[in-house]
């Protein structure tokens, strides 16, 4: 449809649009769908006329790339422009050329019929908000996006200002969402965004995940870096008693990873959203990996898929405060290679080698590299968290130590709830906490600690408020991440 200044009109009903084109003579079949630049209208013989539209099906990754013929050349329409007369608006406008076609039992309206009809549904955007000449891409009738069926969408006349309840109250409503520029998702992006939004809603609305009786210490959503912020929110609601393993996008190339990790999204060729999430209890890994499923089929897996197994195996042979990285506890045995999905070449998996330079770049930007070490194989070679500041908790082993202590000390403290708040109870609490921390010291998680639970931090005011304070100071054991081996050459006969 197109705005003629008085309303949204069927594209082939406007004899003189804002550019002076006679749209009545444009292709009767509507926009031309072609992978190559058309030289005639869709019938293969009628010459092109000014105002003809072409949708390039040769680039479905960026669908819809819409061009308008100006009489001699095809000009690309900017999908992000919805304010100029040469712009375009994406919205639900109508299902049919009338308000009586039932979307369930009625026939599928033809595009050719829609082009010559000015009918619009009551929820169509107000044409007065857009300039004369602006196009309206009707997402209600288009394909390649995700819609949901609403049986009583037009049942409430108050839902749309000045609307009259139509005879048919049910319709399809666009559901796949829009990107940051207001352009709807299409194709696989529409499917993915629908799944992502559903998963976000499931995390945000789940009370079961937030209940104390639901116990877990790792949070992972393999293949969905879009959910990292939601997992952080869930962990915060659980008083930061779990650690999050995050992914980088499956199609992220080694040349784009720095821009992604710094969130300089404009520098990304594939338009990926940059990494913005920060948390002391989050670690992000790169790149993706190549593995096999249970049926033996080759599959591409996200980094968190291999790292979840690596974390679990590391915990089985050591403790959570040991770094799940390096040749002892960071070997990856459920993948054969690492790389990314090349979306520019049919989704082929491209194996890459993570060089020392790339590893350094990733680590500087708080992304942990997976790499191949000669004689060892695939290894997780980093353990930085996404901590926004430099501290002991910018390392995975220390952050997981804190998570462990929160969980264990909370259980240790529970039996003392409703006990008398006197020196006897405080000494018992102190002894119980020290027993836990002594065990961690013996297991190489702490250098030292201090527990204070007496009348210095349990003042009369705090006691009167029925509160018990236990102050703990710890010195966590740090992991070796850099080994310096200076070799000195001495003259013959020099003393060693």
Image: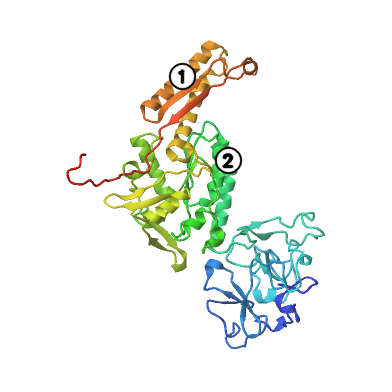
283, 298: nearer the viewer: 283
Per the image, label 2 sits on a secondary structure element best described as: loop
**Residue 413, image x, y percentages:** 51, 22
**Residue 386, image x, y percentages:** 50, 44
**Residue 130, image x, y percentages:** 75, 67
- Alpha carbons under labels 1 and 2: distance apart: 34 Å
The residue indicated by pointer 1 is 432
The residue indicated by pointer 2 is 206
199, 467: nearer the viewer: 467
Residue in view at x 18 percent, y 46 percent: 492
- Look at the picture and state if 316 lies above or below 178: above
Question: Can residue 285 be seen here?
Answer: no
Residue in view at x 54 percent, y 31 percent: 212
| Front disc: 1 or 2 | 1
- Look at the picture and state if 21 lies above or below 185: below
Residue in view at x 57 percent, y 66 percent: 144
The residue most toward the left is 493
The structure's colour scheme is: rainbow
- Look at the picture and state if 82 lies above or below 249: below
**Residue 101, image x, y percentages:** 70, 67
Per the image, label 1 sits on a secondary structure element best described as: helix
Residue in view at x 53 percent, y 62 percent: 267
Question: Can residue 16 be seen here?
Answer: yes
409, 382: nearer the viewer: 382
- Dot 2 surroundings within 10 Å: few (below 14), some, or many (20 or more)? few
């Amino acid at each position: 449809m197109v705005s003629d200044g008085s309303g949204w009109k069927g594209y082939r009903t406007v004899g003189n649009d804002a550019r002076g084109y006679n749209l009545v003579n444009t292709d009767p079949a509507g926009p031309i769908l072609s992978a190559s630049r058309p030289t005639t209208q869709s019938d293969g013989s009628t010459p092109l006329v000014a105002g003809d539209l072409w949708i390039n099906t040769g680039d479905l990754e960026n669908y819809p790339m819409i061009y308008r013929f100006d009489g001699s050349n095809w000009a690309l329409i900017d999908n992000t422009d919805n304010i100029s007369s040469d712009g375009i608006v994406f919205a639900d406008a109508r299902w049919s050329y009338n308000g009586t076609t039932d979307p369930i039992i009625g026939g599928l309206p033809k595009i050719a019929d829609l082009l010559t009809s000015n009918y619009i549904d009551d929820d169509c955007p107000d044409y007065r908000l857009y300039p004369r000449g602006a196009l309206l891409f009707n997402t209600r009738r288009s394909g390649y996006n995700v819609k949901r069926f609403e049986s009583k969408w037009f049942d409430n006349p108050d839902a749309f200002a000045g609307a009259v309840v139509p005879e048919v109250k049910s319709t399809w409503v666009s559901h796949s969402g829009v990107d940051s520029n207001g352009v709807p998702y299409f194709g696989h992006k529409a499917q993915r965004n629908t799944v992502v939004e559903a998963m976000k809603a499931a995390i945000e609305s789940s009370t079961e995940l937030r209940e104390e009786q639901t116990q877990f210490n790792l949070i992972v959503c393999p293949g969905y870096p879009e959910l990292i912020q939601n997992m952080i929110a869930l962990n915060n609601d659980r008083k930061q008693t779990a650690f999050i393993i995050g992914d980088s996008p499956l199609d992220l190339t080694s040349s784009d990873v720095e821009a992604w990790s710094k969130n300089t999204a404009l520098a990304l060729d594939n338009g990926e959203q940059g990494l913005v999430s920060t948390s002391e209890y989050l670690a992000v890994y790169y790149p993706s990996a190549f593995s096999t499923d249970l049926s033996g089929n080759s599959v591409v897996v996200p980094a968190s898929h291999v790292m979840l197994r690596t974390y679990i195996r590391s915990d089985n042979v050591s403790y959570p405060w040991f770094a799940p990285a390096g040749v002892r506890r960071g070997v990856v045995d459920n993948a054969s290679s690492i790389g990314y999905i090349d979306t520019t070449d049919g989704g082929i998996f491209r194996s890459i080698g993570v060089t020392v330079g790339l590893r350094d770049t990733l680590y500087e930007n708080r992304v942990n590299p997976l790499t191949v070490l000669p004689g060892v194989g695939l290894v997780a070679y980093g353990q930085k968290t996404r901590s926004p500041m430099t501290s002991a908790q910018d390392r995975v082993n220390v952050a997981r130590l804190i998570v462990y202590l929160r969980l264990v000390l909370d259980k240790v403290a529970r039996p003392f709830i409703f006990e008398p708040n006197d020196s006897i109870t405080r000494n018992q609490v102190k002894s119980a906490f020290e027993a836990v921390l002594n065990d961690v010291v013996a297991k190489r998680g702490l250098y030292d600690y201090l527990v204070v639970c007496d009348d210095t931090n349990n003042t009369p005011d705090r006691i009167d408020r029925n509160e018990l304070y236990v102050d703990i100071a710890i010195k966590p054991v740090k992991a070796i991440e850099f080994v310096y081996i200076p070799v000195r050459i001495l003259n013959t006969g020099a003393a060693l």
